[in-house]
Amino acid sequence: MKNKRLIALAGVIILSLASYALGWSTLFTVSSVEVKGTDQFLPQNVRVGEKLARVEPRAVAAKYEKSAFVQDAQVSRNWISGKVTISITTRTPVAIFNNQAIDDSGKAFVLKGNLPAKLPQIQAINVEIAVTAVEFLTSLPDEIRSGLKILKVRSTGAYVLIVDVEGRNVEVRWGFAIDNALKAKVYKALLAQPENAKLKRMDLSAPHAPIVK
């Protein structure tokens, strides 16, 4: 009985010492912090000298994920070196609206520095409509999307595209986001016709009766 009490007491002492070492002792502190995956400014949520046991990876990751341009954050601790590594996955912009970037999930965010020059510009009355337009944009086939410079959203909800076709701007009146696959086929067929080599506009709002100019 006495041996059991001694073993239990020893266990409590060991646990207490381990808890102290992890939570209070200078043996396990943050020696360095590395942020990977972005050069954008992020708040310093982990500091050198902080107790390593008090760096809770999920809580730290959640703080970084509050930054609009951060899609995902993963935090790891190295108990031997004391290094904390923060791996950031940033959102990839697919369009620009009023100096805001929008990714393919429809999340609008601000990028520090210069925005990518080759991304299409969305013209809409507000960011909510611009975000909806991104869903339409990402559904377009590569032969249209790769040359898309401007995507206008009319007050009616109809779309107008400005597409770079071999160095010239072609205005494509797409209309509403219906019959998109058919409109894409008609678009490609019209551009392939020799007589349309210099066309500046095409109206695909009624794809069975397209108009070119």
Image (spheres, rainbow, N blue to C red):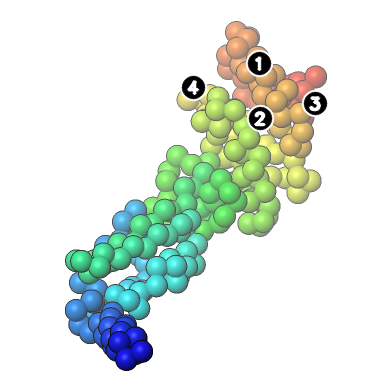
Q: CA distance from mark 3 to mark 1?
A: 14 Å
**Along the line of sight, the residue nearer the viewer: 150 or 116:** 116
Q: CA distance from mark 4 to mark 3?
A: 25 Å
If you read the primary sequence from the N terminus, does the residue marked by circle 2 or circle 3 appear first?
A: 2
Query: Does dot 1 land on a helix, a strand or a loop?
Result: helix
Q: Are marks 1 and 2 in contact (CB under 8 Å)?
A: no
Q: Quick check: 9 left or right of 170?
A: left
Q: Can the viewer see residue 102 in this picture?
A: yes
**Along the line of sight, the residue nearer the viewer: 206 or 202:** 206
Q: Position of residue 138 (x, y in %)?
A: 59, 38
Inspect the image, locate mark 3, and give the three-letter code of the amino acid beneath it.
Answer: Ala
Q: Position of residue 151 (x, y in %)?
A: 61, 41
Q: Are marks 3 and 1 in contact (CB under 8 Å)?
A: no
The quarter of the displayed image where residue 212 is located: top right
The residue located at (72%, 45%) in the rendering is: 154
If you read the primary sequence from the N terminus, does the residue marked by circle 4 or circle 1 appear first?
A: 4
